[in-house]
């Protein structure tokens, strides 16, 4: 999730700066990371938990893509604040 958050930060900063090509390439990386997480996710989770996690991740992907396509910077900033917690988490 921290890697996904890095890409969402890149997307937001690029859009703020008006760098569409940079935002598009970061968005492609975002989609790839989310898709890989959906595909491989938490194999150690119970089937019920895994299903719930996948459901939430798919919904997250849908909402983020919508915000990106609409260039809704307010919504994209909210996603960044949520994802920031994953990069600050102590292992």
Image (cartoon, rainbow, N blue to C red):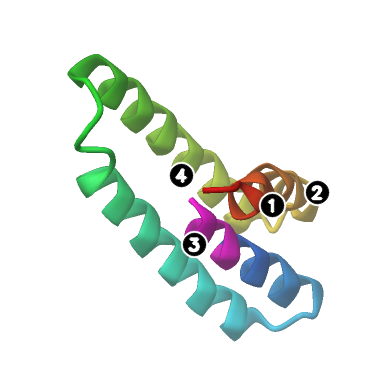
Query: Mark 4 or mark 2: which comes first in sequence?
Result: 4
Residue at image mark 1: 80
Residue labelled with disc 2:
74
User: For the residues marked 2 and 3, what is the alpha-carbon distance in whole angstroms?
Assistant: 21 Å
Q: Position of residue 44 (x, y in %)?
A: 21, 33
In the rendered image, residue 16, in percent from the top left (x then y), is placed at 80, 72
- Rendered image: mark on residue 3: 3
Region in magenta: 1-7
**Residue that label 4 marks:** 61
Element class at badge 4: helix
Q: Residue at x 30, y 20 (%)?
A: 49
Marks 1 and 3, how far apart at CA? 12 Å
- The disc, 2 or 1, on the residue closer to the chain's N-terminal end is 2
Q: Who is closer to the viewer here, 90 or 84?
A: 90
Q: Tell me the chief SS of the magenta region.
A: helix
2 or 3: mark nearer the eye:
3
């Amino acid at each position: 999730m921290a890697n996904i958050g890095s890409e969402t930060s890149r997307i937001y900063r690029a859009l703020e700066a008006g760098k569409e090509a940079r935002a598009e390439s970061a968005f492609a990386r975002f989609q790839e990371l989310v898709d890989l997480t959906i595909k491989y996710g938490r194999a150690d989770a119970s089937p019920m938990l895994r299903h719930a996690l996948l459901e939430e991740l798919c919904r997250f992907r849908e909402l983020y893509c919508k915000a990106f396509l609409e260039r809704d910077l307010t919504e994209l900033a909210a996603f960044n604040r949520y994802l920031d917690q994953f990069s600050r988490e102590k292992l």
